Image: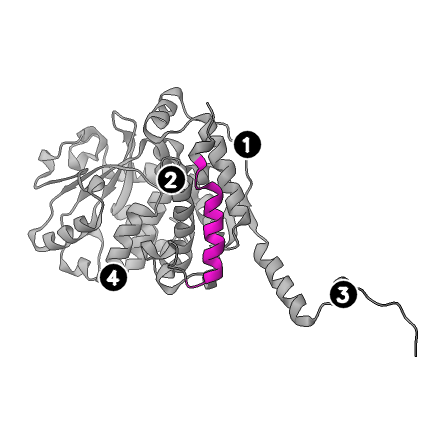
Amino acid sequence: MELGVARPNSQKKLSYSSYKQRNTMSRRLTKRHLTPADEYQCPLPAETQAIAEEQLRETENARSQALEALRNWLEQHPKFMAIRMDSNFLLRFLRTKKFSVPMVQEAIERYILLRQSWGIAFNQLDYKLPVMMELIDLGYIFVSPFKDKLGRRVVIYRPGVFDPYKYTNQDMCRVMGICYETLMEDEECQVRGVVHYADGAGVSFPHLTLFTPKEAVRIVKNGEKTIPMRHKEIYGVNVHPTIKFALDFGMALISEKIRKRVKLYTAVKDVEIDKSLLPSEYGGTMPMKEMIELWKVELASKRDILLLNDKMAVRLEMYSEAAREGAISALRAGANSCAGADAVGDAMRGLTGNFRKLEVD
């Protein structure tokens, strides 16, 4: 009998299946940091920082602890494949959720999942695309260069110029996404929030057929709960009676807090907003065309980072069909199709569930 040295069990050669399993796990834990975890230096003036502390519970200590907790969570969570780690990106969620880390975790995961699952509408947020440029030049959606007395930007909507026979619901989502994502890169907007002004002139029933009722519900609910924006005031004018039922439907889907901020008017002259913030066509001083040109300069300055966002990704196979379709409640415990992923998710949330208790004065 040939003599040899016995191989301890712990050193047995791995079978192919075991090797494949380990290799797959290794790939799953590998992440791409699209932006580095920077050392945050607050660029906000003292007045804005005071607003952040009073309204959002943001202090230097709370901010540093929350950023560290989120980065640790993102690094360990197996569902994330590629993610931005820069402070600007993470802070927009923290500020919207008033530094509740568990709520931020859910919002970030839902946000990236939504962008990825509905990529045809929420990726390629490039204002230079011909259709996007057409809609921007028409004044479908743009932002006034002026700020109100509370330092907030005003988003102006003219949905009546959107031709439902020429453009698609994907075009509508994409051009609005370009606007919102550009604003979200601005830390002043993250803290102070935004004001919305919509002119419903020209909107008719064909506009309502762009989305199915199910799609409309998902968009409205995600618009409030997933997109990290602070909606402070919402003004609507020229709402035609034939589409009032659709408006009532949408109002029923949003929270009571947001509903109280919606004000509707029958005539432009009656809208209780500082008219100097609006184009001259609505009582202001600057022509709409000039405002749009200034807005395109802002869009150009943020174009690269908006396109980088397309590379953020989660592992779609670890989510239920409902979650991939944008169901708000689908990421909560028990709603995920992958039981193993649920257990991991619960454990990750447990790491920071009592985050606020960590803050030390």
Q: Is residue 281 left or right of residue 89?
A: left
Q: Is residue 260 visible?
A: yes
Q: Which residue is mark 4?
A: 214
Q: Looking at the picture, how far across and down is residue 310, in whole percent?
A: 46, 52
Disc 1 or 4, which lies upstream in sequence?
1
Q: Amino acid at mark 3?
A: Asn
User: From which residue to which does the magenta span run?
Assistant: 337-355
Q: Which residue is mark 1?
A: 39
Q: Residue 184: which numbered mark, if any?
A: 2
Q: Is residue 106 left or right of residue 139?
A: right
- 1 and 4 marks in contact (CB < 8 Å): no
Q: Looking at the picture, how far across and down is residue 203, in whole percent?
A: 15, 53
Q: Amino acid at mark 4?
A: Lys
Q: CA distance from mark 1 to mark 4?
A: 42 Å
Identity of the residue drawn at 45% across and 40% down = 90
- 2 and 1 marks in contact (CB < 8 Å): no
Vertical placement of 249 versus 64: above or below? below
Q: In front: 174, or 354?
A: 354
Q: Amino acid at mark 1?
A: Glu
Q: Which residue is mark 3?
A: 9
Vertical placement of 339 versus 129: above or below? below
- Label 4 secondary element: helix
Vertical placement of 226 versus 188: above or below? below
Q: Residues within 10 Å of mark 4 (few under 14, many from 20)?
A: few
Q: Residues within 10 Å of mark 2 (few under 14, many from 20)?
A: many
Q: Residues within 10 Å of mark 3 (few under 14, many from 20)?
A: few
